[in-house]
Every structure is written in C-alpha cells, then in structure tokens.
Amino acid sequence: MAEPLLLIPGMMCDARLYTPQITEFSAERAVHIASYAKCETIGDMAQAVLDAAPSHFALAGLSMGGIIAMEVLRRAPERVTRVALMDTNSQSETPAVAATREPQIVGVMAGRLAEVMTDVMRPEYLAAGPYRAEILTLMQDMAMALGEGEFVRQSRALQRRPDQQKTLRKIRMPALVLCGAEDKLTLPRRHEFMSELIPYATLRIIEGAGHVPTLEAPIATNAALREWLEAPLVLR
C-alpha cells in the first residue's frame, strides 16, 4: 500500500494550490492537505500539521509550505518517509525582508488585503504564459478566503522562522528539491544550495514555471513528484 501524501499549502493558499497533484495522485494513495490556520509561529504550524497527519507519510510543501515541512521534519523525522521541498527557503528571514512585511501587515489590518496581495504575489513571480492571469486570480481568491487575520499571523511567523540548514543535512530519505526555472521570489540557485546540503537529494528545475510550478507546469511537476514517490526508501 502506497504511503499517504501530505501536501502543505504556501502562504495564503489552500488545497487549490495542489489541484493537479490531487487529481494525479489521489487515485493511488490517500492525499491529505494540511491546515495550519490560527497558528502564530512556524513551530505551532508544524505541530498542528503533525497532530492531524497520518502516522507515516510522504511530505511535500511549496513556499511557506516547504518552510513548515522542514520544521515538521525537524520535529518528527521518524514519521516522514520522503520529503519534497518546492520553491522554498531553508534560511531564516533577513532583517531587510522582514522589514518589508511591516507595511504589508499595516495595510492588511487597515482592510486592504486584496491590494497587499498584488504586491505579495506579483505577475513577474510567475512565468509568462497564457495561464498567468488565471493563476494570479486564483492566488487572490485563496487569500481572500483565508482573510486578514491569517495574513498577519503567517507574516509574523515568517519573520521569526528558524534556519533549517541543519535539518537538511540530517535528511536520510528520498528528497526532492524542486523549483520553477523563472522563480524570482525563491531563486533556483537557492535550491541548488539546498540540494547540496541534503544527502542523496534530487534537484529538478521546472522550465516554463515561476514560483508556483504546481499550477504553472503541472505535467512536469507531477512527473518529478511521481519519480520521487516511486524512489526506493532504502538509500545506498
């Protein structure tokens, strides 16, 4: 029996971030979408994911979902059979980036979530293509569904997130590091660095995709995920 697949959505996203993956893999295994609503820190988010998760599972996360996935792995590596980190960042937030979140938080608290989200998820963060506008609209819809309080909580959690480079060095399971070739938010070179930290990691750079390859290039992303899911658990 294939192990369950646990997908952690990114910042201000829900299950719709993974619609192509749910469609692709749910026929052959249980697919769970993690929720970390109302949590204040990355640690609290990771614990909420673990509390609701199966006893053992394949773990994948995109962007903030990848950050939470690394904390899940740090806390309970014995429960994770394999890990996929997509368009994410293993390092703690720099003071400069943390500072840019402050006016966004102020704007959201003033009732301007839709306006702020146009700055958080800019068109240039996605690859140019016929579906860019549709994906941006979906990102807005997901954010508006989650609401202002979640934006503030998630922003604060990202500002205080821990560095996970030690966690990556300890990984001893099939690991996929995946990134859109045109991701200008979490750059491909950062993923090359992450893959070098992880023993036996596989690096996949997805052409024709930016920060959201799960939606921008679902066929190529699903192919990489399938290869990862079918990799033997025993590493040589």
Image (cartoon, helix red, strand yellow):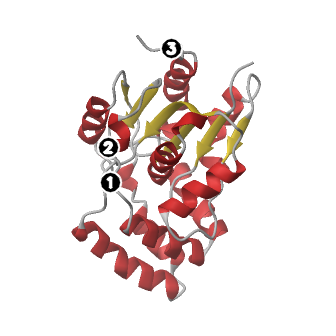
Is 50 situated left or right of 89 in this image? right
Image mark for residue 234? 3
For the point 63% across and 35% down, which residue is it? 20
Is 77 situated left or right of 31 in this image? left
In the rendered view, would you say 199 is above or below 16?
above
Kind of residue at disc 3: Val
Q: CA distance from mark 3 to mark 1?
A: 28 Å
Image mark for residue 163? 1
Q: Residue 114 location in percent, x, y?
A: 53, 73
**Numbered disc 2: secondary structure:** helix
Q: Nearer the viewer, residue 214 or 197?
A: 197
In the rendered view, would you say 144 is above or below 216?
below
Asked if residue 49 can be seen in this view, the reply is yes
Circle 2 or circle 1, nearest the eye: 2
Q: Which quarter of the rendering shows the C terminus?
A: top left
Q: Residue 64 location in percent, x, y?
A: 46, 54
Instruction: Give the residue at mark 2.
Output: 166
- Label 3: how many residues lie within 10 Å, few (<14), some (14-19) or many (20+)? few
**Numbered disc 3: secondary structure:** loop
